[in-house]
Amino acid sequence: MIENSVKSRKSKKDFSYSNGVDKQHRQKPLTTMPDTALTTYQFTIDKAIAEWLEQKRLRTGSQKTYDAYRETMQSFRLMLSHGNIDLLDNPTDVQRLAAIWANTRNGQMRRPGEDVSPSTYNQRLAILSSFYTFLQEVYHLDIPNPIESVKKWPVQAYAAAPSPIEPETVEQGLLNINRATLQGLRDYAILAVALATGRRAHELVTLRFEHMKITGGKKEQRVTLTFAHCKGNKQMRDNSTEKHHRVAGISACPTREEPATSAR
């Protein structure tokens, strides 16, 4: 286990990459934090990772993001352990192994047998890089970020996107929905909002009637939809008018008195 006291930045010449701790502080495994006699803190990689993950969870408000970062870090450290090294060891070794690891498939991949996509490769490296940035900014460790030197892969936008659906197909699909039933009204409303806004599935299914506000007169109604649970725990709004609805093939939104309010 790598242990040393949290210290201010030291010159790179004093830093030993054999274990990630400068020799001077390796002789003092436990000291008090600067400017306080109340808190004793012993630095370890495991504690730093735990704090890094918790700060990520608090900042994004997303358990899914927390889990993804935790699993990524665990996977990379497992690979490093096969060579008897860890995150703060020789940065050249960490850099070389990071490039290999980021391109390695795991059993949880959605499409077994296919190559790792450039976006997945780059995302893995970005997660690792954020940890080294965290150590530099929060712990003030004067260490290099070995991931910064790993060459990223070019990403072609929408390369893996499915073929677009023809407008006629979309229109016919909407017409086939039986809006005489509550379920049909619900399905039509969800698909209509999806087509008009392009929102994520999770954002759509958490939309409720109180998230919709209709303003304006009969000639020009404006509908404001508030999506309370967007990516990164953000709240976002979309505005549309009756003109936008007609262009998208969407009928006017139901009023509160209509049965659609029960189909959530």
Image: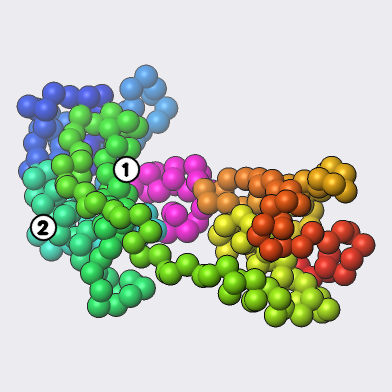
Q: Please name the residue that numbered disc 2 is placed on.
A: 84
**Which mark is in front, 2 or 1?**
1
Residue 44 in view here: no
Residue 75 in view here: yes
Q: Is residue 226 left or right of residue 146?
A: right
Q: Main secondary structure of the magenta part?
A: helix
Label 2: how many residues lie within 10 Å, few (<14), some (14-19) or many (20+)? few
Q: Which residue is at a point 22% across and 59% down the rendered structure image?
A: 102
Q: Which residue is at a point 9% across and 59% down the rendered structure image?
A: 83
Residue 52 on the magenta span:
yes
Q: Is residue 87 left or right of residue 217?
A: left
Q: Position of residue 240 (x, y in %)?
A: 70, 48
Q: Please name the residue that numbered disc 1 is placed on.
A: 130
User: What number is the disc on residue 24?
Assistant: none
Front-lying residue, 158 or 71: 158
Helix, strand or loop at label 2? It is loop
Q: Position of residue 55 (x, y in %)?
A: 44, 42
Front-lying residue, 36 or 57: 57
Q: How many marks?
A: 2
Q: Which residues are magenta?
A: 49-67
Q: Is residue 214 left or right of residue 236?
A: right
How far is disc 2 from disc 1 in space, using C-alphas? 23 Å
**Where is 139 relative to 61, above or below?**
above
**Where is 120 relative to 241, above or below?**
below
Q: Are marks 2 and 1 in contact (CB under 8 Å)?
A: no
